[in-house]
Image: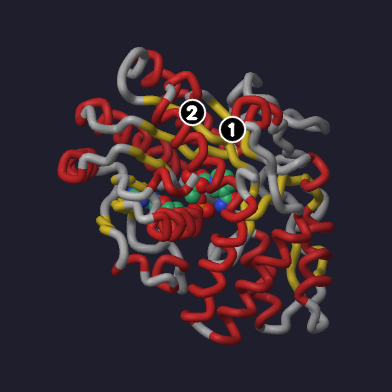
Amino acid sequence: MLDFYEGKTVLVTGDTGFKGSWLCEILSLAGAKVIGYALQPPTEPSLFNILGLADRITSVIGDVRDYRKLEKVVNDYRPQIVFHLAAQPIVLESYKNPRDTYEINVMGTVNILEAIRKANCVRSFLNVTTDKVYENKDFRNHPFKEDEKLDGFDPYSNSKSCSELVTHSYRRSFFTNSNTAISTARAGNVIGGGDFSIDRIIPDCVRAAVSHRPIKVRNRFSTRPYQFVLEPLFAYLLIAEKQFFDESFSGYYNIGPDSVDALTTGKLVQLFCDIWGEGSVWTDSTIPNAPHEAGFLSLDNSLMRKVFAWDPIYHIKDAIRLTVQWSKGYYNDGLSAAKEITDKQIHEYSAVFGK
Ligand SMILES: NC(=O)c1ccc[n+]([C@@H]2O[C@H](COP(=O)([O-])OP(=O)(O)OC[C@H]3O[C@@H](n4cnc5c(N)ncnc54)[C@H](O)[C@@H]3O)[C@@H](O)[C@H]2O)c1
């Protein structure tokens, strides 16, 4: 599949972030001309800097709320394929700054779609949303399907529901019978090396383990569809390629692990401790009256299976093992070891993908 991307001009918004950096690394290994558009890396350290991506892709630092700048980048580089990942992606941050979250996640989506509509060069557009876009009522215990109601609870989740709706409207209103295929992809909770975000469970685990502190777990009973970072990224690449040639592949897709890999945060952290070793432990740090976060989240991935014959490859233990391998490589051996492990993990995943 990666052969398809060789020589293609691909715009990735959010390239300086965790998933964006992995995606740009894959695309640059595939020989694509990659244009990035994002704010400066959101964390220090960052995967973007560890991989030295600024030297290998064209990275434009800009705000998705700045329509004129975004439009100019699309017009200047005329990408054939666009992956939209730029977002404020943290639930707790969205409770602190709801207006910013809505402006970035909703108007950012409007702006990229508008720039694409005007430029008339993009054949394939994929908006990366999340498993949290669905209305999630208490006591739910079965996976979400794509046709369920979009109405996320907190400002982050809800802004992503809005981002979905904006995409649906643009698709119907402006891109029907056009040369541009439009899809959205709702991925699960992603884990992998190089995520340094605050208030995310695996980065919290790694930070605690390297400094020999107990891991503090906020919501040990909440269930999430955890998956290795390359699972959704290769699925995005697959959708974007298929719809590039055939518009009928465009749609709204769940990209989740199998239901056995939707597990509680407590179980996830225990697996992390077992695999990390070195005496790492966790403690229950439930905060009374903490802002609401959904108790149960799981995605039905049967549409992806049916339409694309797509299958998740790694189970949760593999995902944690690869994350631990990456993190130990980075903390013990530095930047070049981390880059080497990143590329090795991409090559290994790519060799199995599509077999
Ligand atoms: N990490 C996960 O578990 C997960 C799960 C489902 C969906 N997602 C989605 O995947 C995408 C990437 O997430 P991530 O984990 O890599 O997040 P991240 O925080 O690591 O990266 C976010 C990216 O968006 C950019 N950005 C933020 N505000 C911006 C603005 N105003 N203008 C331009 N760029 C801006 C940042 O600079 C960065 O490049 C997001 O859309 C997120 O909602 C993530």
What amino acid is labelled 1 in the image? Val
Q: Residue at x 47, y 80 (%)?
A: 336
Nearer the observer, 187 or 67: 187
Q: Which residue is mark 1?
A: 133
Contact, CB < 8 Å: mark 2 with mark 1? Answer: yes
Q: Residue at x 69, y 33 (%)?
A: 301
Whether residue 210 is visible here, answered yes or no, is: yes
Q: Is residue 126 above or below residue 76?
A: above
Q: Residue at x 25, y 56 (%)?
A: 60
Instruction: Report the side of 29 relative to 296 (left or right).
Output: left
**Which corner quadrant of the image does residue 124 belong to?**
top left
Question: Most extreme residue toward the bottom, as rendered?
Answer: 332
- Dot 1 falls on a residue whose secondary structure is helix
How far from the left and from the top, in percent, is residue 101?
44, 43
Q: Which residue is mark 2?
A: 164
What amino acid is labelled 2 in the image? Glu
Q: Residues within 10 Å of mark 2 (few under 14, many from 20)?
A: many
How far from the left and from the top, in percent, is residue 273?
80, 71
Q: Residue at x 72, y 67 (%)?
A: 321
